Amino acid sequence: SRLGVVAGGYNPKGWVGYGEARGSIAAFLYTFDGGPDGNTLTKLRKVGGPGLAQMDMPESGPSFGADSLVIPLSEDNPKLARSKLGSYYERFEDGTNSIFGKDASVQLRDLKVYHGVYEEGEYIPFTDAEPFALS
């Protein structure tokens, strides 16, 4: 963030943009801080079962849980990120309920996305999302 917070999340299911709430108990959020012993990593686990680990919506950016880490990438405020921990991802040990510390929302300085690289025809794991339509 512009305040110097380094935070992010891991999602083992990938992003396909089919408009799904996808579950996984392996998903997590993390943050680095420059604590007294240097860089301290804090991992925040998925809580409440696998449901809603990520919201995979085609019209918005990454979202972990409904509100745990949301980066909407909206046209009017493309660098906004919000966080409210507790319902889908655990809070910090001291009860802090935002991955950004005391701030519920921040402006991002950078957004980095890491992904796998696969050869043509190679199986891509966790590509189990199915498009569907309601009639």
Image (cartoon, rainbow, N blue to C red):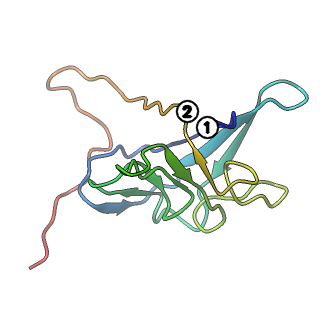
**Percent position (x, y) of residue 6?**
64, 34
Q: Classify residue 84 by image quadrant.
A: bottom right
Q: Quadrant of residue 2?
A: top right
Query: Who is closer to the viewer here, 113 or 104?
Result: 104
Rendering coords of residue 98 (x, y %): 68, 56
Cα distance in 3D space between marks 1 and 2: 5 Å
Residue reaching furthest bottom?
Answer: 135
* CA neighbours of label 2 inside 10 A, class few (<14), some (14 to 19), many (20+): few
Counting from the top left corner in percent of width and height, residue 115 is at: 38, 29
User: Which residue occupies 78% across, 26% down?
Assistant: 39
Q: From the viewer's perspective, is 73 left or right of 38?
A: left
Helix, strand or loop at disc 2?
loop
Dot 1 and dot 2 residues touching (CB under 8 Å): yes
Dividing the picture into quadrants, the one containing residue 132 is bottom left
Q: Give the residue at the far top of this rendering.
A: 119
User: Could one spot residue 26 in this view of the protein?
Assistant: no
**Along the line of sight, which residue is nearer the eye, 64 or 112?**
112
Across and down, in percent, residue 70 comes to: 49, 54
Residue 114 relative to residue 126: left or right: right
- The residue sitting at 68% across, 48% down in the picture is 100
Instruction: Point out which mark residue 1 bears.
Output: 1
Q: In terms of depth relative to the viewer, which is nearer, 116 or 122?
A: 116
Image quadrant occupied by the N terminus: top right
Q: Would residue 97 be visible to someone looking at this image?
A: yes
Picture layout, residue 122 above or below residue 132:
above
**Which amino acid, mark 1?**
Ser
Residue 109: which disc? 2
